[in-house]
Image (cartoon, helix red, strand yellow):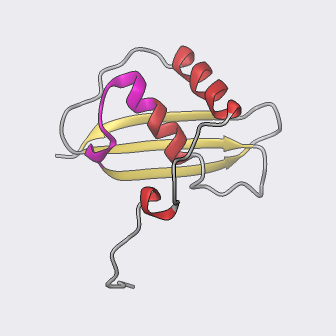
Amino acid sequence: MRINIKPLSVNQVWQGKRFKTPTYKAYEKELLLKLQPMEVPEGKLTLYITFGLSSKNADWDNPIKPFQDVLQIKYGFNDRHVYKGVIEKVDVKKGEEFIEFSFDLIK
C-alpha cells in the first residue's frame, strides 16, 4: 500500500527543547565505552540492528534513534547517510539484553 503523505521526522513531533534524561546519559556513556573501533563506509548505508529485549511489550522501533545517535557520536558519521534499516527484535530473558549492529554500503 502506498499513501501519498510526507512522513514526519522525530524533530517535527515534539514542541520545545528536549533534554537527555539521566538514564539516557548513563546509556550513552556506557555504550560509548563498549563500542569497539570501526570504520563506517562512506556513501549510502544500510544499518542492520538486532535488539535483544526482555520486555515483550517493548516496541521494536523505540530503541533505534537513541542507539543510532550514539553511533554517530562514536563513529563520526551523519545518519542522513542511512538509506535502509533492517531492524530485528528478539525476545530474551531479563539480564540477557543485547544490541548487535553492522553497516553495509549500498552499491
- In magenta, the rendered stretch is 71-82
- Quadrant in which residue 25 is drawn: top right
Eyeballing the image, is 76 above or below 105? above
Q: Position of residue 28 (x, y in %)?
A: 57, 27
Asked if residue 19 lies left or right of residue 80, the reply is right
Q: Quadrant of the N terminus?
A: bottom left
- Give the farthest residue toward the front: 16
Q: Position of residue 61 (x, y in %)?
A: 56, 55
- Identify which residue, 2 or 62, lies in the foreground: 62
Q: Position of residue 75 (x, y in %)?
A: 36, 24
* Residue plotted at (81% across, 31% down): 95
Assess whether residue 81 is covered by the magenta stretch.
yes
Q: What main secondary structure does the magenta stretch of the protein show? A: helix
- Identify which residue, 68 or 22, lies in the foreground: 22
Asked if residue 39 lies left or right of residue 63, the reply is left
Q: Position of residue 103 (x, y in %)?
A: 35, 36
Eyeballing the image, is 78 above or below 59? above
* Residue plotted at (32% across, 25% down): 76
Eyeballing the image, is 37 above or below 61? above
Q: How many marks?
A: 0
* Residue plotted at (76% across, 32% down): 96
* Residue plotted at (38% across, 31% down): 72
Asked if residue 92 lies left or right of residue 64, the reply is right
Eyeballing the image, is 37 above or below 63? above
- Identify which residue, 66 or 59, lies in the foreground: 66
Assess whether residue 103 is covered by the magenta stretch.
no
Asked if residue 28 lies left or right of residue 43, the reply is right
